[in-house]
Image (cartoon, helix red, strand yellow):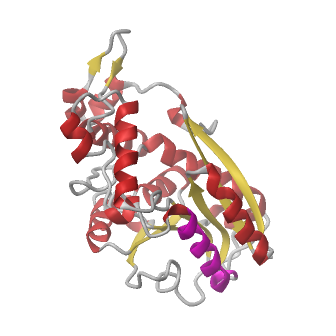
């Protein structure tokens, strides 16, 4: 993980349970005498996330509707820290309209914020950024707004916007003359519900779950259709994002997105090179999981 990620250290379950007592119901000692949870249990993962947000990020309360994506906090924090590195060099010499260095007034946009609202929350609480989150799903938007409202300080830093046009990612969200230092996105991984189900079963096997019913019905991190899959999958989604970014090239400093599948990189690079834009790849890893961020900006 990123060296600034405070989750590089093992979880302090004693401190986490004090911050969120409900976590204690899901904590147990494994065969090595180490406190842990069942990471194949969606409820256990949810309460761990809630405890992490309360203890480390001063969140008053946090929730998500049933069956919506329940993200692993450490990996999400990693994306935020890498964005901060990306911004550091180019932002320190830029000046905003009020005469202050833009390194102290960063504004970011999360495309597909989801019901959990995790990236805006972490961006606001780790780096004091102003964040906007946008989503096409009305229930997700309402949940994200509820999560912002639960912590008073977030109401000054985070705004959630409804995207009403399914064909567009930035249009209808970015206002005229509005500027964002960066955009970020965790795109749908899969091309179909069937592929998403296979991914679910593979993850559950990796977590050594033996409950076949749980394998079929649930995923430890949950997820709605628009969160997990879309026509064409991740590669086509990102290519569409790159094409649409052209229209907003003067209103965004860095466009960024996660890319979960390494085999999609060649197609993405081809699209970026076609537009002759500057781009970079940031590799990330959490345990055995490897991912990367693609970032691009226009001259």
The structure residue drawn at horizontal position 61% and vertical position 65%, both measured from the top left corner, is 106
**Residue situated in front as seen by the camera: 273 or 53:** 273
Q: Is residue 184 left or right of residue 24?
A: right
Compared across the picture, whether 126 is left or right of 96 comes to left
Q: Residue furthest bottom?
A: 176
Q: Position of residue 208 (x, y in %)?
A: 34, 27
Q: Position of residue 178 (x, y in %)?
A: 58, 83
- Looking at the image, which residue is at 37% across and 84% down? 164
Rendering quarter of residue 151 = bottom left
In the rendered image, residue 24, in percent from the top left (x then y), is placed at: 22, 27
Which quarter of the figure is the N terminus placed in? top right
Give the percent coordinates (x, y) of residue 191: 45, 62
Q: Residue at x 39, y 39 (%)?
A: 202
**Quadrant assignment, res 288:** top right
Taken as a whole, is the magenta stretch helix, strand or loop?
helix
| Quadrant in the picture for the C terminus | bottom right
How many tags in the picture?
Answer: 0
Asked whether the viewer can see residue 157, the reply is yes
Q: Going by the picture, which residue comes out furthest to the front?
A: 194
Residue at 27% x, 64% y: name it: 143
Q: Does 206 appear above or below 95?
A: above
Q: Determine if the magenta segment contains residue 240.
A: yes
Residue bounds of the magenta highlight: 235-249
Question: Front-most of 23 and 99?
Answer: 23
User: Is residue 178 one of those drawn in magenta?
Assistant: no
């Amino acid at each position: 993980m990123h060296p600034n990620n405070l989750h590089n250290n093992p979880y302090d379950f004693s401190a986490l349970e004090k911050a969120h007592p409900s976590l204690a119901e899901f904590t147990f000692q494994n065969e090595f005498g180490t406190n842990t949870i069942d990471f194949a249990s969606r409820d256990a993962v949810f309460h761990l996330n809630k405890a992490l947000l309360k203890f480390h990020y001063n969140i008053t309360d946090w929730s998500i509707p049933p069956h919506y994506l329940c993200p692993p906090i450490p990996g999400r924090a990693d994306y935020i820290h890498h964005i901060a590195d990306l911004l550091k060099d180019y932002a320190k010499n830029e000046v905003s309209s009020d005469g202050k260095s833009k390194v102290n007034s960063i504004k970011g946009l999360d495309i597909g914020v989801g019901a959990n609202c995790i990236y805006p929350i972490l961006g606001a609480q780790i780096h004091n950024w102003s964040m906007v989150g946008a989503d096409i799903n009305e229930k997700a938007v309402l949940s994200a707004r509820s999560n912002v409202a639960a912590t008073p300080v977030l109401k000054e830093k985070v705004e959630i916007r409804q995207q009403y046009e399914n064909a567009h990612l930035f249009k209808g969200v970015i206002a005229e003359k509005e500027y964002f230092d960066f955009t970020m996105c965790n795109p749908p991984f899969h091309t179909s519900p069937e592929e998403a189900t296979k991914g679910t079963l593979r993850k559950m096997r990796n977590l050594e779950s033996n409950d076949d019913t749980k394998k079929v019905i649930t995923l430890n991190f949950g997820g709605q259709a628009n969160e997990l899959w879309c026509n064409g999958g991740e590669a086509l989604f990102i290519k569409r994002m790159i094409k649409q970014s052209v229209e907003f090239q003067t209103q965004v400093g860095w466009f960024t997105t996660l890319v979960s599948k390494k085999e999609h990189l060649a197609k993405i690079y081809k699209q970026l090179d076609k537009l002759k834009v500057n781009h970079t790849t940031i590799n990330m890893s959490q345990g055995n999981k490897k991912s990367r961020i693609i970032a691009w900006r226009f001259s």
